[in-house]
Image (spheres, rainbow, N blue to C red):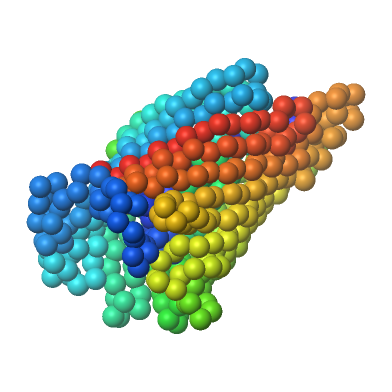
Amino acid sequence: MAQTVAPTASAPQTRDKAPGDQSLSPVQDLPAPAAPARVPEGEQPFPQSDYLMGDLGGIRNSLAARGVSLSFGLVNEVAYNPAGGTSEKVAYADQLSFAVKADMGKLAGLTGGVFTLNISDRNGKNLSDIGQLGTLQEVQEIFGRGNVARISELSYAQDLFGGTLNVKGGRLDIGDDFIAFSCKFQNLTFCYFTPDHIAGDNFFAYPVSQWAVRAKLKLAKDVSLKVGVYDINTKLADKSGGFSFNTSRSIGSDTMTEVAWTPKLGPAGLPGTFKGGFWYSSARRSDLFLDANGLPQVVTGTSPLTHKGYFGYWLQAQQQLTGGRDGSSRGLTAFANFVQTDHRVVAVNQVINVGLFYVGAFASRPFDEIGIAVGRSRVSDVLRHAQLLRNATFNLAAPVQRSEIPVEVYYSLNIGKAIAIRPNVQYVRHPGGTAANKDAVILGLKNVITF
């Protein structure tokens, strides 16, 4: 039988720094939205603390003076499908996280050193599964890698040569440094954006961490180069591996390279981030078409040809287009992301999305945000040819997969900087990349709280 694409098992969550999203997973290159120069009295009734629980009675300030910062976060997502799937269902999933960062300059005299520990705990169910939507990408990005607590980062980073070079090692989250993107949307197509979405059987990202080393070199004021090598250890991705320090189940490594340009453009100095990169994985993957003898697997029915290693590349852009004269992120920001993998061995080998963020659309709600995005997850031509050959050979009319196209719109009600209440609507055209699955409408609610 030809291979078909199953819904992805991984749903990473990022550390987007928009209001309500602080320190949950990877930090964006772009600055967090800042308050306008002046907020009319009464228009923001909630204190503008980064944390719902404030200073914890002086504990945070006391620790910060010693170089230690703490954060606790909760993200939960509810999804309901009034259309699509085999039956109407409601699904709930959440993630609790705890993070501590230690300035080793203050603690131990190691100027430019930072220790980080991030622990995550995921729970719940996934609407893509229980509603049998048949999607390539999950409609609740917070779900994935099991209902289990795990170490999501345990690292030490050190500036060298006056900050020109930064080296980090330990248990790292690959999406913290490579292909990083915000996770404001609820559909996984628009969130985080690592190859973990589409090659998740041997490419692991948040909440899974891997033994790794990463170096970042400043080439110019706003240009940097990153290189990283990440061990691929299947034990650490297992539900039983949440707190494991196993090093014996390595199946290869991911080598990542990325160049980033972060200019401030125009008279207002509007911030942007433009990135491109390449990765090579030494893990083995099965060919989607050929068997071990170089013949079509759908015809012979024998074991597939195995490839030693595969590759991919990506391009990303995000640019604020309006506003910014008061130093804030109020205004319109556009983004686009593209990732391409090896079509011989990865079933969903291309993902693209484009969209807009608008902060402060209403004068009475200067921190609120509107987001809209459209994307496409494209099934490999090689797999599609295998499905066509299967149908022709055995006189079948089985579905042939092409592309899944989701659209999502959200409104983020940001209460202070610590709470975001984000209702959203998703429409998924051709779930699974085929008209054999009914188009889906998803009503969602994503809440993000930093305590």
Q: Nearer the viewer, residue 26 or 340?
A: 26
Percent from the top left, x then y, of residue 425?
57, 37
Rendered position, 305 above or below 81:
below
Percent from the top left, x then y, of residue 89?
55, 20
Q: Which of 215 and 293 is in front in this view?
A: 215
Q: Which of 148 and 185 is in front in this view?
A: 185
Rendered position, 77 above or below 38:
above
Quadrant housing residue 119: top left
Query: Is residue 185 at least partly visible in the picture?
Result: yes
Which residue is the extreme one toward the front? 41
Considering the image in quadrants, where does the N terminus appear?
A: top right
Rendered position, 90 above or below 148:
above
Q: At 40% across and 71% down in the image, what residue appears?
A: 327
**Position of residue 127 in the picture relative to residue 161 (left or right):** right
Q: At 34% across and 60% down in the image, what residue appears?
A: 39
Query: Is residue 155 at least partly visible in the picture?
Result: no
Quadrant housing residue 398: top right
Q: At 57% across and 28% down in the image, what residue appears?
A: 128
Percent from the top left, x then y, of residue 225?
47, 72
Q: At 35% across and 52% down in the image, what residue appears?
A: 43
Percent from the top left, x then y, of residue 53?
20, 44
Q: What is the tally of numbered marks visible in this picture?
A: 0
Quadrant housing residue 157: bottom left
Which residue is the extreme one toward the top? 87
**Position of residue 189 in the picture relative to residue 240 (left or right):** right
Considering the image in quadrants, where does the C terminus appear?
A: top left
Q: Nearer the viewer, residue 420 or 144?
A: 420
